[in-house]
Image (cartoon, rainbow, N blue to C red):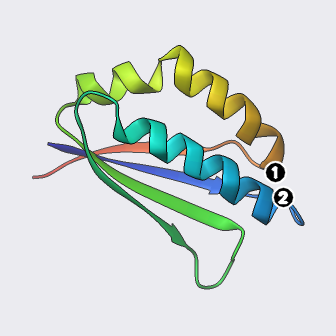
Amino acid sequence: MIRVLIERHIAETLESAYEVRARKVLQQAVSAPGFISGETLVDARDPNHRLTLSNWRSEMDWDHWYRSEERKELMAELVPMMDQDETITVLFQS
């Protein structure tokens, strides 16, 4: 199993629109092969800084979802709402 940490920073005033679209991304990820679980957290000191932590069966499963047309289409709606590029970190348990 691997974990994937996705960090995003939302532009001011776009929080509610972002939430609606981000939920769509997570809902679609849930049905992706190899997806185990996921949660989204809000930075206590910066409410526009969002972190999504998801668990995947393998890096190959994550990579397949990450490169999928479905995710690319969903992200096309999210990217304009962010004021920074998303950061993705793939984590392995040691």
Circle 2 is placed at which residue position?
11
Image point (34%, 34%), residue name: 31
Confirm whether residue 35 shows in the render.
yes
Total numbered labels: 2
Image point (47%, 18%), residue name: 67
Work out whether residue 68 or residue 82 is closer to the camera in this orientation and state it.
Answer: 68
Residue 23 x %, y %: 57, 52
Report the residue that reaches farthest toward the bottom. Answer: 44
Q: Amino acid at mark 1?
A: Asp
Circle 1 is placed at which residue position?
83
Crowding at dot 1, Cα within 10 Å, few <14 / some 14-19 / many 20+, comes out as few
Confirm whether residue 9 shows in the render.
no
Image point (46%, 36%), residue name: 28
Residue 61 occupies quadrant:
top left
Identify the secondary structure beneath mark 2.
loop
Residue 38 x %, y %: 35, 55
Crowding at dot 2, Cα within 10 Å, few <14 / some 14-19 / many 20+, comes out as some
| Horizontal side of residue 13 vs 52, given as left or right | right
Residue 46 x %, y %: 69, 77
Identify the secondary structure beneath mark 1.
loop
Q: Mark 1 or mark 2: which comes first in sequence? A: 2
Work out whether residue 19 or residue 59 is closer to the camera in this orientation and state it.
Answer: 19
Q: Amino acid at mark 2?
A: Ala
Image point (58%, 44%), residue name: 24
Work out whether residue 61 or residue 28 is closer to the camera in this orientation and state it.
Answer: 28
| Horizontal side of residue 57 vs 79, given as left or right | left
Mark 1 to mark 2 CA distance (whole Å): 5 Å
| Horizontal side of residue 18 vs 35, given as left or right | right
Residue 43 x %, y %: 58, 76
| Horizontal side of residue 14 vs 69, given as left or right | right
